[in-house]
Image: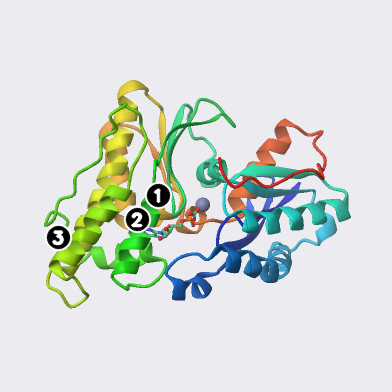
Amino acid sequence: MRILGIETSCDETSAAVVSDELTVLSNIALSQDTIHAPYGGIVPELASRQHIRSIPYVVAESLERAGAALAEIDAFAVTQGPGLIGSLLVGVSFAKSLAYSTSKPLVPVDHLESHVYSAFIESRDIAYPVLALLVSGGHTSLIRMDRPLDFRLVGKTRDDAAGEALDKIAKFLELGYPGGPVIDRLAAKGDSERFTFAIPQMSDGSLDFSFSGFKTAGLRLIKRLGLRREHPDFFDFLASFEAAVIHSLLHNLERALETWEPRSLILCGGVARNQKLRARFRAFAGRKGMPAYIPSPELCTDNAAMVAALGHLRLAKDPGRGLDLALNAYPRP
Ligand code: KG4
Ligand code: ZN
């Protein structure tokens, strides 16, 4: 059984072929970073137009690298939402046309769930119940799983996502787009305890996150200090800001564990590429005596291997599934 996955929820055009046992035969992702960089953020209209241009080539390349002809693909999976609606529609329409022309099933997949499932590609025996911390440019969520395919959102951001806060601070400092990886690199040169940022507390006791306050506090400090690359406090500021974001993420994880005890912890999403977050998350899990699963960097950012893998599992549970031509994309969870 070979399944071809397609992911176009944001600014990454990706296609992957995954076989039984979740072996990734190919995982192609074409970044649009250079297109959006001049704007310091994703321009939705440009993103969907670029997906239209790229998707045929990316799918062809994923087939070639997997050594498979289109006719040898047994099923298709596609990200249905949440994400940018124009971008999602390109992937959904293309996947529909492939499934229709080959008379094969098409499995829709939720973007957040596929991020969580990315951890299972490299670790098949993750023990349930699982608590996943998903940190990306569009989402910051805590997801609980008591058994396979049982994804339950237990906390989410009420405003900005963690990656978005990093990207905006980087944009303000003119460090380029996306800012997360640049901050990851530059923060390593600074003192993370130099500046402090207040961690938001939810008055209703929920496990929700908030990052807009960090962003505003960061922007104010940048203005007050007149921070630029050459400023002596530049690296300390970045290290302190990054540390505050990480602290806030782990603070909520800790609170979640006060009421419920999972057997495994997962860290996933684009920001899970961050070196310091990976290390702190591992140390946190170690202190709790729990295994920590963090996917390889290429499986953290948006990619179609996680889509194909989750599609594979959904199809295994529902083998009678076909192609629903009325299938539509959804922008919000
Ligand atoms: O999961 P993803 O590819 O797309 C969304 O679904 O949002 O995540 C993209 C986010 C961006 O905000 C980017 O700055 C951030 O992940 N990111 C990082 C790193 N690599 C990517 N943030 C911190 N450190 C990194 N190394
Ligand atoms: Zn994502």
Q: Residue at x 18, y 49 (%)?
A: 197
Near-viewer residue (33 or 302) = 33
**What x and y, as percent, mark residue 145?**
50, 29
Label 1: few (<14), some (14–19) or many (≥20) C-alpha neighbours in 10 Å: many
**What x and y, as percent, mark residue 204?**
32, 26
According to the image, label 3 marks what residue?
191
**What x and y, as percent, mark residue 14?**
62, 61
* Residue 169 can be seen, yes or no: yes
Q: What number is the disc on residue 161?
A: 1
Left or right, 29 with reference to 261? right
Query: Mark 1 and mark 3: span between their CA atoms?
Result: 24 Å
Label 1 or label 3, whichever lies nearer to me, is: 1
Q: Amino acid at mark 2?
A: Ala
Q: Amino acid at mark 3?
A: Asp
Q: Is label 2 in contact with label 1 (beta carbons under 8 Å)?
A: yes
For mark 2, give the secondary structure: helix
Near-viewer residue (309 or 132) = 132
Answer with the quadrant where ligand 1 appears in the image: bottom left
